[in-house]
Image: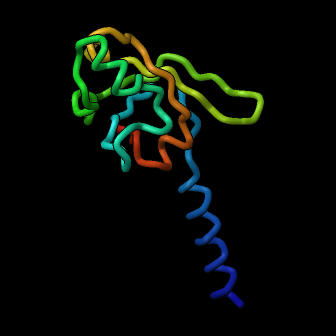
């Protein structure tokens, strides 16, 4: 009985410690390589728009960029959206100062990662 109680306590503490913390303004994230050709949960412009503007035609310029959370928004359906800005102050693709991302889905998909 003691072993069962001890196991339940350890399992409960593991679940509590592994819960995701809500995003806060000023948290630092890193943009990772997406699994597909484009980002699904970070609202970057489509490649054809980038080509028309004469900037880069791929997303490689944003891989491994350090970004900061500038604002946090919660939608009516419960999704948490964050506004991301580059840590160094430069612009995404030379013209976007900020982008919007679905925080939980982008984190689960591996498009962004938290930095400690």
Indicate whether 10 appears above or below 4: above
Could you say which quadrant of the image residue 37 lies in?
Answer: top left
* Residue sitting nearer the eye, 107 or 19: 107
Percent of width and height locating residue 11:
60, 71
Q: Quadrant of the N terminus?
A: bottom right
Q: Residue at x 48, y 17 (%)?
A: 70
Visible residue check, residue 26: no
Percent of width and height locating residue 104:
56, 41
Indicate whether 48 appears above or below 21: above
Could you say which quadrant of the image residue 73 lies in?
Answer: top right
Q: Quadrant of the C terminus?
A: top left
Q: Residue at x 47, y 27 (%)?
A: 43
Indicate whether 9 appears above or below 95: below
**Can you name the residue that lies furthest to the right here?**
76
Percent of width and height locating residue 81:
58, 28
Colour basis: rainbow
Percent of width and height locating residue 30:
34, 35
């Amino acid at each position: 009985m003691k072993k069962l109680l001890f196991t339940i306590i350890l399992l409960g503490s593991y679940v509590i410690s592994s819960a995701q913390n809500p995003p806060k303004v000023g948290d630092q994230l890193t943009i990772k390589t997406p699994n597909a050709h484009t980002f699904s949960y970070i609202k970057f412009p489509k490649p054809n728009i980038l080509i028309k503007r004469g900037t880069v035609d791929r997303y490689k310029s944003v891989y491994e960029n350090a970004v900061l959370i500038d604002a946090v928004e919660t939608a009516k359906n419960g999704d948490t959206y964050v506004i991301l800005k580059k840590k160094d102050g430069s612009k995404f693709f030379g013209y976007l100062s900020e982008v919007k991302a679905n925080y939980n889905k982008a984190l689960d998909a591996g498009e962004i990662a938290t930095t400690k």
